[in-house]
Structures are given as structure tokens and as C-alpha cells.
Image (cartoon, helix red, strand yellow):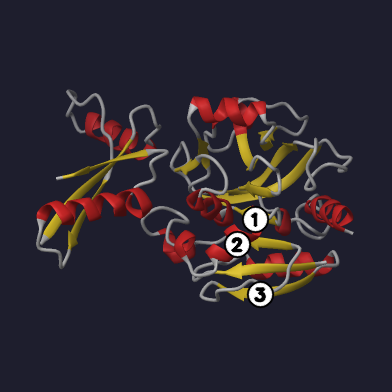
Amino acid sequence: MKSSVIIFPGSNCDRDMDVALNKFGFKNKMVWHNDNVIPKSDLVVLPGGFSYGDYLRCGSIAAKSNIINSVIEFANKGGLVIGICNGFQILIETGLVTGALLRNKYLKFICKNIFVKANKSHNKYFNKIKKDVLELHIAHNDGNYFCSEDDLKTMEDNDQIAVRYCDINGEISDNSNPNGSIQNIAGVFNKKKNILGMMPHPERVIDNCLSSNDGSYFFENLLSNMK
Amino acid sequence: MKIKVIVTPKKGVLDPQGKAIQQTLNSMNFIDVNEVRQGKYFEINTNLEDEKDAKKNVEDMCKKLLANLVIEDFEIL
């Protein structure tokens, strides 16, 4: 399976994602934001970081990069696209997924492991993962997910909420909400569920010598669905 | 010609920075302040000479880049 990770000026999780994808069997290529064409890929990843120094709004400048037109075209044809953290912010700014990411509720940059519950129905990202609660990592200043009530209802009706923050026992509550996101939302799908945007970083937790190995389930599951 | 734009968080959208500023002002004894909303201000110099054309162009810029209409409103001054 072939993947492409897009590098923007200020991306800083691009190499981690490259390591993770290669570890789990993808043949990954790094693609510069100024290129116009994505190499033949089964998966495109917009990595985390601080593209363009988060100027104007996080992800807003990167969303106008040369490569983005190809990403949109790839996504609209049903290609799998993942945006992690800043990549999620970029997806939001392109309009490929719904909503907005506001400054964290308590105005703090949050960098820690958190627990999430993933939506396993009818999607290639989480469907066969056996574990109910995943321990992933977040590191962001603007991850406070927001959308209008109408959009929230539409997304809930279409089962587009991908990931929610929870506690170690899987309970979803205000206490397990690190950044003020509505409904504890940590990630969403587009309507067809080929696009996933989420704040947590699976690529940071892919080995037991790191703080968690739960990101491995994500990549293994994704790959198993693509073979 | 210079066109000025103000972008503000939409009503009902949480503005944690505005809230923190309000609390600080209150703690500085500006006890009358009951809300602060923090926005952005842009000055755009354009080669267009017709004000109507220039403002129309800036409106397009606001919709496409300067504001995120999910969470922000804009006003061309």
C-alpha cells in the first residue's frame, strides 16, 4: 500500500508519521506542499505541526497550498485522507470536514496522553480494533472542536463523529474533556467516511517503549482494510 | 486605496481569549465590563481605484481566507 505525507513549512510530525507508516507496511513518500501532484497513493496524510506558524488561523494558509487541490481531488474520488492535529485543522479550513477548532477552553497548550473511544461502524480507520478505549497523545493549543447545532445533528445522524475523549474506563464526560470540545469530539469523518480528521496523534504511540502502543492498532487496522 | 476589515467571533461561539481579558479587566477594577470579544483587524492596500470594486474584492477575500464563517463574522469598514 502506498501513502503520501504532505510536508508544509512548520510541519513537525511528518517524520513521525513516515516512521509509523513504514513500520506498519506502507510504502510512504514525502510530498512538498508546493508540488502540484500527489504520487500514486492509497492514503494521503496531512501531518501535525504548526504550518505557517499558525498565522491567521491554524491551518488556514496551508489550506491554500498548491498541493491541496490534488488532495481535495483525491478525497472527492473516495481516496483515504487523514489529518492529524494541524492536519485536522487544515482539513477543516479546506472544508473537507465540518466544523472549526477554537482555542482550548482553558487557554493552555495541552501535551499529554488522553483516552478516546472510536467509532467502529462502517469505516476503515477503526472498524476492527478490539480495544474499546485507546490511549493516544494530544499536543495542541487549538483543539476545541466546535460546529453549529444543525451541523452537529447532521453529523450525528450520519454517524460522522469519529473519536470522543473519555476516561480510562471509557466514560465520556466533562471531566474527560481536555479542551472544551463540544460533545467531547476529538475527531470527525466526512459524510462518506473516507476522510478522518482528529486531534490525537496515533503516530506518537506505536511502540511499548513509548508511553503507549495503542496507535499501532490504528495503523494495523487501516492497513488490514486496504489489502 | 486602503480597505479596513474587522473579523470577530460569531455570537454564541466560545471566545476563551476574550473571556480571559474580561476577567483580567474585572480584576483591575474595571468592574463594569461584562463581556469582551477578541477579533482581528486588517488593513488591505489595493491597486483598485473604485471603492465599490475594492470592497467587493475584499468581501471575497473575507469569505475565502480572512474569516472562517463557521465561527467568525466580518465587517468591512
Marks 2 and 3, how far apart in space?
14 Å
Closer to us: B67 or A208: B67
Q: Within 10 Å of the Cα at label 1, are there few (<14), some (14-19), or many (20+) other Cα atoms?
A: many
Label at residue A30: 3
Quadrant housing the C terminus of chain A: bottom right
- Residue A132 vertical placement versus A193 (above, below): above
Q: Are marks 2 and 1 in contact (CB under 8 Å)?
A: yes
Marks 2 and 1, how far apart in space?
6 Å
Q: What amino acid does circle 2 point to?
A: Val
Closer to us: A39 or A163: A39
Q: Are marks 2 and 3 in contact (CB under 8 Å)?
A: no
Q: What amino acid does circle 1 point to?
A: Ala
Same-chain check, marks 2 and 3: yes
Residue corresponding to mark 2: A71
Marks 1 and 3, how far apart in space?
18 Å
Q: Chain of mark 2?
A: A
Residue corresponding to mark 1: A75
Mark closer to the observer (2, 3): 2
Q: What amino acid does circle 3 point to?
A: Met
Q: Secondary structure at mark 2?
A: helix
Q: Chain of mark 3?
A: A
